[in-house]
Amino acid sequence: GQQVMQIPQYQHVQEGEDFTTYCNSSTTLSNIQWYKQRPGGHPVFLIQLVKSGEVKKQKRLTFQFGEAKKNSSLHITATQTTDVGTYFCVGLRDSNYQLIWGAGTKLIIKP
Amino acid sequence: EAQVTQNPRYLITVTGKKLTVTCSQNMNHEYMSWYRQDPGLGLRQIYYSMNVEVTDKGDVPEGYKVSRKEKRNFPLILESPSPNQTSLYFCASSARGVSYEQYFGPGTRLTVT
């Protein structure tokens, strides 16, 4: 079953509000990747985090990897309509070097 | 242009009729993978290949076959499709394995009636 829990499943925000999605793993991860999938599209790679406690920024997006390498978050500041889509985390299991995908968080901008 | 292509993009078929979904990449990537995407479940890996003639099961391999005879191609075969294989399928490739970013194809929406 799913071993990377991603929450929330959906988040509705007004344009200009912030958005955060969280991923938690039951096991230690070698690294974690984040992907974005626009409606009707395919997943597109955003970033990879490797080091414990790592923080990376891409313009309004901030990615964090936990100290224990079991959790991660993506925070978007001042959302725009172009941010709409589903955000996935993907962890690489330390134990067997297999990828595990979170179920995704769908970002919806309220009209 | 660097890309992953899949064909067909849409397919409606009947139970039991064998089908193949093709996947090709032009980036000389070693690693290729197939996923299915179902609402609320994210992406689940079906099979992956670390290189030519090397394939392995992912999380949901039952009912699927793959082959990797050439580096660029990684077809997905459904020998006897069933309605529970109705899904959106993605092929992906990566330069050197699972530690690196994956490039996804546009997806194949399959309906089995």
Image (cartoon, helix red, strand yellow):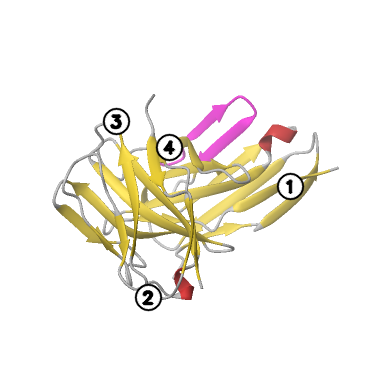
Image position, residue A96 (x, y; %): 26, 59
Looking at the rendered structure, the secondary structure element under dot 2 is loop
The amino acid at mark 3 is Met
- Taking the spot 30% from the left edge, 69% from the top edge, the residue there is B79
Q: CA distance from mark 3 to mark 2?
A: 34 Å
Q: Is residue B69 above or below residue B14?
A: above
Q: Which residues are magenta?
A: A50-64
- Between B9 and B98, the residue placed more toward the observer is B9
Q: Nearer the viewer, mark 3 or mark 2?
A: 2
Q: Nearer the viewer, mark 2 or mark 4?
A: 2
Q: Nearer the viewer, mark 2 or mark 1?
A: 2
Q: Which residue is mark 3?
A: B27
Q: Is residue A50 visible?
A: no
Q: Was residue A60 drawn as part of the magenta stretch in this picture? A: yes
Q: Which residue is mark 1?
A: A108
| Image-quadrant location for residue A17 | top right
Q: In the picture provided, is B4 more to the left or to the right than B75?
A: right
